[in-house]
Every structure is written in C-alpha cells, then in structure tokens.
Image: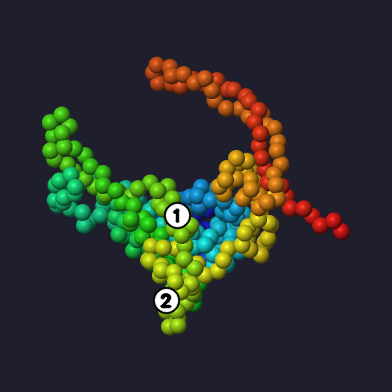
Amino acid sequence: MCWFLGQLQLSTAVNPRVYCNHIPGLVRRQRRLCHKYADAMPSVGRGAGIGVAECRFQFRHQRWNCSTVATDASVFGKTILRRSSREAAFVYAISSAGVVYSVSRSCSKGDLAHCRCDPRRTGKHRDTRGEFAWGGCSDDVRFGSLFGRKFVDAREKKVRDARALMNLHNNRAGRKAVRKHMQLECKCHGVSGACTVRTCWASVMDFRSIGSYLKRKYDAATLVTMDQSGRDLVAAVGDHKPPTRGDLVYLEASPDYCLLDQQVGSLGTAGRECNRTSPGTDGCDILCCGRGYDTARVLVTKKCHCKFIWCCEVECQDCREWRDVYTCKAPRRDST
C-alpha cells in the first residue's frame, strides 16, 4: 500500500527516479506508475495523509484510536494490518479513498499533466430544478479512481488468497465512497441573481463526509470467508446478506484493544481520557474496559467574554477554571 507516502514531503522538483526508487514498500508495478505519473505522487502522498488524519478523527473515542499511526514507518502499524480485522478493513478503505480524493482534486486544479477537468461533463443537462449547462471545472473522479485502482491495488494483485481479496474489496469500497459523495455546485446567471440560467459543475464533497460514511460501513462490516472456487468472498454466516461492493468486509474478529499487546498492535486504553457521563464508546465504562478511572482536578485556560470590534476583529479574555479530568486506570499487576 501507499501509507508511507503520507509521511513523505514529495515534490515534483525532485528527480522522480530518485524518490520513486527509494520509497520503501512499493512493488515493481507501483514504481513503474511512479515513474510514469511522477507529478501525481505528491497527490498520492497527500491522499495517504488525509486518510491517516481521518482515521484518527473517526476513531478518536474508540478503544482503538489509530494510536499506532505515529509509531510505525508503515503509518498504520505493521501489526494492526497483519490481522484481517474490521480495523484493517477501514484502514484500506479510507486510504484508498484518500488517494482518489486527492488525485481527483489535483486534476481539477490543473496540477497533473494526464488529467484536467472531467471531460465527460459538457453540454446541457437537467436535474430536479430544471436545465443547466455544464461549466466550471468538475473534479475528474473517474481518472482519480482509475489511477487509484492501478496504484493502490498493485500489491494485492500479486497474491490471490483470502486476505488479498479482502484488501481489494475494501480498496474498491473506498473508491466507491468518493464517487458516491459527489455534489452539484452551480452559479446563477440572470437579472438580480435570478436562476434563469445556471452553470454547474460536479465536485467531491469534503473528506469528513466520506470518512463518516466509511465509519458507518465499518460499524456494519460483514464477516466473510473465501468461497469454494477460491475466487470470491461470501458471508461467513449463512443467513447474512452477501456484502455489496460498497460494504466493508473482514475475515477475523477484532481484539478488544483493552490492554497493551504488541502481538495485535494494541496500545491499550490505560491513561486515555474518558467521559464519565457518556454511555457511548467514549464513556469511562466502555473505554476503560471495566477497570475504572482516575479523577484529577486540573486548571485549564480558555477564551471567554469575546466581543466583536469593528472592523473586523474579535477580542477575547483568557479565563481560567478548574475542571475534572477522568482517565482510565491501568490494569492491576498480579501481586507475586
């Protein structure tokens, strides 16, 4: 995969042969694509970084909170990806989506030589509000998806086992999530701004919407197994509906991530701040795995008494207040 690229500051000013040949973890086909589409590689790196940031946001209140991201050169941690879990499924999907999103946006900005605006969106069209003309610069999500499929799927194409099929499925789900979150933006032309004539273009929604959508797919992910032909994945539980191409799939159950365990890539939840009154995953009962929590009184500073000053400033005071902070207890050590 391309998560390592999210940590690199790639620049097209650097000889592509230099950085393409020295990015660790790329397979031969990815290096060839790197040489051919050298100007796209910074976009791939930004896309991988977007995926990392979104993973952290979506799981910030969960026992596994992408905490291995900052501690491993592979970005998401080699151990966490070795297990064919829901978390691995989300990682592959959000990373694939990040690459498609970033490359598509770079196309419409004119940053890449092999694509520009979406060439298919021309002429007249109609929606629920009536007729409009395609104009502006629509994001070329088709090119972004095709490039993302070639680059991101290259490693999995080398092997055809159950895990490779799982990764390919979740990569595709990430690409579909970006295509699903396109929106129509329009500019009105007419007397006093009346929309007698509209010029519209299609753009990708903000990545937070895509991340939230994939997080819901994570919550409803399907446990699968390889079918008898060895060419496809099917639901592991017979009465469950087969997963669609946009669903996330996984092959084995997740650990509970309660305790520090290097074998499964879990840092545990000891010391994590929790919400004492929340019944959700951020609540002390769930996040602390029943171990209880410590309470500390801390002095915090925040902005207060803000007022608007013409024109155009906001002036605030610094207010200090004490508040209670709750953190998960560490597991008890056996007294021997």
Image quadrant in which you'd find residue 33: bottom left
| Residue in the picture at 42% in, 47% down | 208
User: Residue most toward the top?
Assistant: 310
Query: Seen from this angle, which residue lies furthest front?
Result: 239
> What is the number of callouts on the image?
2
Q: Is residue 65 above or below residue 27?
A: above
3D distance between C-alphas at marks 1 and 2:
24 Å
> Residue 160, how many percent across, how many down?
46, 77
Disc number at residue 283? Answer: none
Say left or right for 202 vs 230: left
Q: Residues within 10 Å of mark 1 (few under 14, many from 20)?
A: few
Q: Residue at x 47, y 77 (%)?
A: 226
Q: Percent position (x, y) of residue 124?
A: 14, 51
In the structure shown, which secondary structural element does the residue marked by tag 1 occupy? helix
Closer to the camera, 193 or 282?
282
Q: Residue at x 52, y 20 (%)?
A: 305
In this view, the mark in front (1 or 2): 1
- Classify residue 127 as left or right of residue 328: left
- Residue 180 seen anywhere in this rendered image of the structure: yes
Q: Residues within 10 Å of mark 2 (few under 14, many from 20)?
A: some
Q: Position of residue 292 (x, y in %)?
A: 70, 47
- Which residue is situated farthest in the right direction here? 336
Specify how the rendered protein is coloured: rainbow
Q: Say which amino acid is labelled 2.
A: Asp
Q: Residue at x 68, y 56 (%)?
A: 259
Badge number at residue 216:
1
Residue wearing tag 2: 232
Residue 327: percent from the left, percent from the top? 67, 43
Tag 1: amino acid: Arg
Q: Is residue 279 left or right of residue 297?
A: left
Q: Is residue 260 left or right of residue 107?
A: right
Circle 2 SS class: loop
